[in-house]
Amino acid sequence: MSAEFLAALATLTDAAGILMGDAMAGYLLDQRRRYQGSALAVARPRDTTEVAAMLALCHRHGVPVVPQGGNTSLCGGATPDSSGTALVISLERYNAIEQIDAENNTITVAAGATLASVQKAARDADRLFPADWAAAASCQIGGALATNAGGINVLRYGNMRNLTLGLEVVLADGTIWNGLRGLRKDNTGYDLKQLFIGSEGTLGIITRAVLRLYPAPTAHATALVNIASPQAALELLHGLQGSVGDRITSFELISAPCMALLAKHFPSLPQPFQPIPDWLVLVELADGGDSETLNDRLAEALFAAGCEDALLAQHGAQSRAFWDLRESIPEAQRLEGVSIKHDISVPLSAIPGFIDECGQSLLAAYPAAQIIAFGHLGDGNLHYNIFLPDHSAAVYAEESTVNELVYSAVAARQGSFSAEHGIGQLKRRLLATYRSPVELAMMRQIKTALDPQNLLNPCKFLP
Ligand SMILES: Cc1cc2nc3c(=O)[nH]c(=O)nc-3n(C[C@H](O)[C@H](O)[C@H](O)COP(=O)(O)OP(=O)(O)OC[C@H]3O[C@@H](n4cnc5c(N)ncnc54)[C@H](O)[C@@H]3O)c2cc1C
């Protein structure tokens, strides 16, 4: 069967569009190197018609399909299983920026366009596409949509769900749904695009999108604030929201162990406060005025909120240096070794209690644990990662015990065990534990309706 399938597949695109053997290696290993998969082939369609023909073929032959974007998923979402029966469909060659409608503030792109290329196209048209995170150069719009990715500007602009006006999707049997509308208001039935956003490639392959653009800010102000506690950080956020409102684009919390890891692995990065404070907040404002005025407003707002120890970036390079600290934390962790990672959210008001109580219960069970807590405090979303004394993959033997401690503290606050990175392979069993039978049943009904043969990204997402 596979010879017949592969022969038919080869007729659907050009020779460079089908990879086999060693050429597939980069598509079969996940970003964190936890999942090594295997595949029949990797197909690289160039347009929607080719995607549709490939899905129709897979549908006829009962071949599972793993959609893949930039393969930056942090939970093994884009990696096939080890059976070798799936076709990986990579959107990397379908990457055009198709149209910018500056008056409608929209951009239409193919799903394989990288986030960085969309940001640049928006900048070139004097607009802002605000989605941003450290994988921007390699992750693709299709993958960002399929995971409803967030990043550092969610506080002001929302996540991919909020940034999307229209989608084109190829369904499991090869049917093309064109919902590429650039409308901000449209109450004509179910909002179908929202079904596909965050569905992790299990309901269809996203092929094109109409995304929202915003006026490009002309002024930025950045501050790094020494803050006593997460509670004080929360109070600062509310104080700033009262004074500078939605000019706040980012509000990131950084704990002392993060700074210590940076000092160890990136000694060339400046440590702005000595000794390292227990907590820091990185605040970014943006608006359409001039940077000097915005800096003054931020200084006044910090002073009014009672901050006595804050550094205001005096120029772009200093702002970049502050952000380098924040964005180097994941790499510093990687250099330190293997940790048990969590990407959780709780209501903002519950963050201080979560950090206190979860920290205590972890240290009671693992007195030598090192907790690396940082992230998007303004969204109630923390990266909450645990190093145990053994920094090798052997720590995964403790993963379910550590997870139980962390996720029960999250669940007690009606939080989410996966705020940004999705379910993929890593968190599949958790969905069954932390989502109600009613929610799981509805999800299964949707999956069965759109993919009755369970061919799209099987073994992911739904337990
Ligand atoms: C350094 C780093 C920093 C990160 N920071 C953040 C962050 O701040 N916030 C955040 O939310 N995420 C973050 N991520 C996670 C990741 O970048 C995002 O989830 C990303 O958007 C995935 O895009 P991708 O193109 O790499 O998708 P992939 O990893 O290739 O795929 C992800 C999922 O989407 C599916 N998929 C891919 N393309 C399509 C398509 N066209 N149609 C249907 N399904 C598809 C795949 O099957 C898979 O389930 C980070 C990752 C890294 C490595």
Image (tube, grey):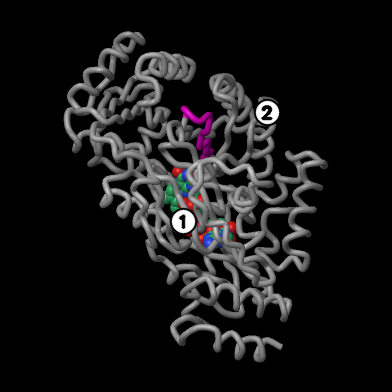
Q: Main secondary structure of the magenta part?
A: strand
The Cα atoms of the two marked residues, 2 and 1, are separated by 30 Å
Residue beneath the point at 31% across and 45% down: 127
- What segment is highlighted magenta in the picture? 377-387
Q: Is mark 1 within 8 Å of ligand 1?
A: yes
Residue 124 % position (x, y): 26, 52
Sooner in the amino-acid sequence: mark 2 or mark 1: 1
Query: 93 left or right of 443?
Result: left
Identify which residue is drawn at 73% across, 61% down.
450
Q: Determine if residue 392 is in view.
A: no
For label 2, the crowd category at 10 Å Cα-Cα, with few meaning under 14, some 14 to 19 and many 20 or more, is some
**Residue 172, image x and y in percent?**
68, 68
**Image quarter in which the N terminus is found:** bottom right
Pointer 1 local density, CA inside 10 Å: few below 14, some 14–19, many at least 20: many
Horizontal side, residue 268 vs residue 157: left or right: left
Give the residue type at disc 2.
Answer: Gln
Q: Residue at x 30, y 53 (%)?
A: 120
Q: Secondary structure at mark 2?
A: loop
Q: Nearer the viewer, residue 160 or 82?
A: 160
Q: Nearer the viewer, mark 2 or mark 1?
A: 1
The vertical placement of 165 against 5, above or below, is: above
Q: With respect to residue 270, does 16 lie above or below?
A: below
Choose top left, top right, bottom left or bottom right for residue 96.
bottom left
User: Which residue in the structure is indicated by mark 2?
Assistant: 414
Disc 1 residue type (three-letter)? Ile
> Which residue corresponds to the image point at 56% horizontal and 73% vertical from the top-left?
51
Q: Depth check: give the residue in front, 108 or 69.
A: 108
| Secondary structure found at label 1 | helix
Res 141 label: 1
